[in-house]
Image: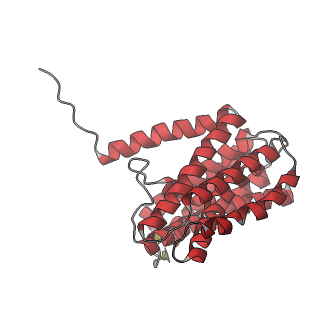
Amino acid sequence: MEEIRKPLNNLQLRLLAGVLGGAVFVGGIYLSEWTFFLLFLVLTLLGLLEFYRLLSAKGFQPNRVIGALLGVGLYVMGFAIKHDDISSDWLFLVPPVMLLALIAELYRKKEQPFTNVALTLVGVFYIAAPFSLLHVLAFLPGRYSWQIILGVMFLIWASDTGAYAAGKTFGKNKLFPRISPGKTWEGWVGGVLLSLGVAWILSMFYHDLALWHWLGVAVLVSVFGVLGDLVESMLKRSLDVKDSGTLIPGHGGILDRFDSLILVVPFLVAFLELVH
């Protein structure tokens, strides 16, 4: 008798997508600077298109093409500068190129042109700029460091895991009920403690940063990671959607998965550039 194959349930799909996605993600960061570059280039583009799609579904009219070109261009420029392919003088092109969004709006003949331009540039600022700043972290030692990028990701996952476990076990006091009723102060403390523990372990194996650097990164991840999650929840609530997308089965969209990283990266860059 031929075996009847049952479709995967939601939990199985979530686990499968998590394992496969995690393997691709870790492998892309670890293999070389070029696989790292391509991985986050795709995430930058998909994240921008997802953001603009959410806005368009609610009747807004951001310029997706211009936004995608500006965001991808900023990302590529960031990598080229840190990879020593071009000089940092190219950054002077950023202000005039960004103003192309205003010029392009002249030809679209849409209602609320300045709102359209503002939302287009918000996408570049909110998504593409943090992903572009990842290159500063990746090349902080003067060469490509997969240790720093993977270490940051491990700390974000540790913070999320610790917060979830502690919140489920001890959570009573709501952290920000207006935006995310499930988050608690007890969960946040659990996330901080697990992140600090993981940072200590990372310092024993990943030597591109010193112990106190890793501990500082863990604190910033614990604070601004949860704020990044809250900011994305605020965006979804304002647009009346549950998930930012359906790209990753059981996990939502790009913004759902990388909301913490998006807000954390600029603070990590500022911290490590000042103290490294």
Write the residue at 39% across / 64% down. 242
The percent position of residue 21, horizontal first and vertical second, equals 49, 40
Furthest-top residue in this view = 1
Write the residue at 61% across / 41% down. 39
The count of marks equals 0
Q: Compared with residue 102, is residue 143 higher up or lower down, i.e. above or below?
A: above
Which is nearer the eye, 81 or 4?
81
User: Does residue 206 appear in the picture of this structure?
Assistant: yes
Where does the N terminus fall, quadrant-wise?
top left
The percent position of residue 156, horizontal first and vertical second, equals 60, 54
Q: Compared with residue 90, is residue 219 higher up or lower down, i.e. above or below?
A: below
Write the residue at 48% across / 67% down. 55
Q: Is residue 2 left or right of residue 154?
A: left
Which is nearer the eye, 182 or 9?
9
Write the residue at 51% across / 65% down. 187
Which coloring applies here?
secondary structure
Q: Is residue 3 left or right of residue 194?
A: left
Q: Is residue 221 left or right of residue 93?
A: left
The percent position of residue 201, horizontal first and vertical second, equals 67, 45
Which is nearer the eye, 198 or 42?
42
Picture quadrant where residue 29 is located: top right
Furthest-left residue in this view = 1
User: Does residue 140 appear in the picture of this structure?
Assistant: no
The percent position of residue 96, horizontal first and vertical second, equals 77, 63
Q: Compared with residue 64, is residue 207 higher up or lower down, i.e. above or below?
A: above
